[in-house]
Amino acid sequence: MNYILKDENAVYYECGFSCDNELFLKLGDGAFFLTDSRYFDEAKEYIRDTQVVLMDRRDPFKVARELIRKSHIKSLTYNPLEWSVDDFEKLSSKLSINLKKSINFSQKKRIIKSKIELDILREASLLGARAFESFAAFVAKNGMGLNEKRLFNKAENIFKDHGELELSFAPIVALDENAAKPHALPTDKILKDDMLLLLDAGVKYKRYCSDRTRVAEANSSMRFTKDARFKDKKKQKIYDIVLKAQEASIKKARAGVSASEIDKAGRDIIENAGYGKYFIHSTGHGVGLDIHELPIIGARSKDVIEENMVFTIEPGIYLPGEFGVRIEDTVIAKVDGVEVIG
């Protein structure tokens, strides 16, 4: 297949380097990385099995068009999600080949992880888990009286490990009723003893992401463990239902099972407990170079799990105005089950 890429993670997967101004072309047996003079020397140092080509500063697509014409290919595949209308017109207006649209074809290529990728993802998850422990220790000792915004800033610093790591995404730090919003933004709400605290966060290691969510009762001895205990009986009830749902989905997950079956296993637990309408998102998503990759673990997903796919399992119940609970782990699919790494 001949194709063109603009997305940084997609390009990195192909050649081991990417930057914020690039094009990657796979034309027959040849591969080309196009960039400007700011990144040219660095690209030549790091890139593998790919020719580095300098872009024309006045027309960044000129060289790409020339390479495409010289290759004499008849068609070129692209991901429409990577392109603005203006950039696509600049590329295509002077070409007479068939441009074939294929959404997320790069993610489909990398949906099954290699041994090297799996080892990197395990290390990313380990580093993320350690950051969860560090944040819990901070909250237990110094967190009371801080608002969500301050807690969010502290979480960012802890997960970045003083600049040693990048974040998979901006952490979600949510208290009580704010935790009922799956992607809650930090507010001025102040942390007090016995509040429910939800933390959803992850780090990047060698560009690969970790992703985990835990819920705990805030106090001087709090930790982010899956056997969380709450003084409030309703919080404990909801937590136990979500944990049971997650365990059911984890038990169902393995190579050969459809993603929708994994979703159903946990969703049935929540629905049978009377809280089905409060589980308002899919059960999970793939994780890799992107924090949201394939497969999709949802009720309408057509994906079938294969060995060494990596994805999250994260059911939740969200009670507006009260609180929300989500428990999330990242797993690696195996023939006889999954390996929980996150």
Image: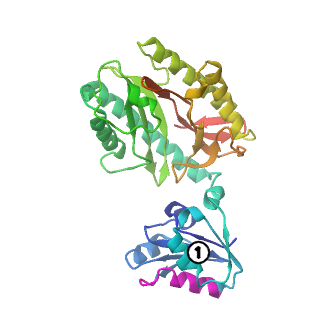
Which residue lies at the image location 43% right of the left edge and 47% below the top edge? 169
Q: Position of residue 208 (x, y in %)?
A: 50, 51
Q: Position of residue 112 (x, y in %)?
A: 65, 51
Magenta segment: 56-70
Is 258 one of the magenta-colored residues?
no
Q: Quick one: 58 or 107, which is closer to the camera?
A: 58
Q: Quadrant of residue 40?
A: bottom left
Asked whether, in this view, residue 248 is left or right of residue 139, the answer is right
Q: Quadrant of residue 94?
A: bottom right
In the picture, the quarter occupied by the N terminus is bottom right
Q: Position of residue 20 (x, y in %)?
A: 43, 67
Q: Which amino acid type corresponds to the residue marked 1 in the rendered image?
A: Leu
Q: Is residue 158 visible?
A: yes
Q: Which residue is mark 1?
A: 25
Asked whether, in this view, residue 194 is left or right of residue 249, the answer is left
Badge 1 marks a residue whose secondary structure is: strand
Which residue lies at the image location 52% right of the left edge and 15% below the top edge? 237
Image vertical order of residue 52 relative to residue 175, above or below? below
Q: Main secondary structure of the magenta part?
A: helix
Which residue lies at the image location 64% right of the left edge and 28% below the top edge? 267
Which residue lies at the image location 50% right of the left edge and 73% below the top edge? 86
Q: Position of residue 5 (x, y in %)?
A: 56, 68
Q: Quick one: 184 or 192, which is closer to the camera?
A: 184
Q: Residues within 10 Å of mark 1 (few under 14, many from 20)?
A: many
Image vertical order of residue 178 relative to residue 3, above or below? above
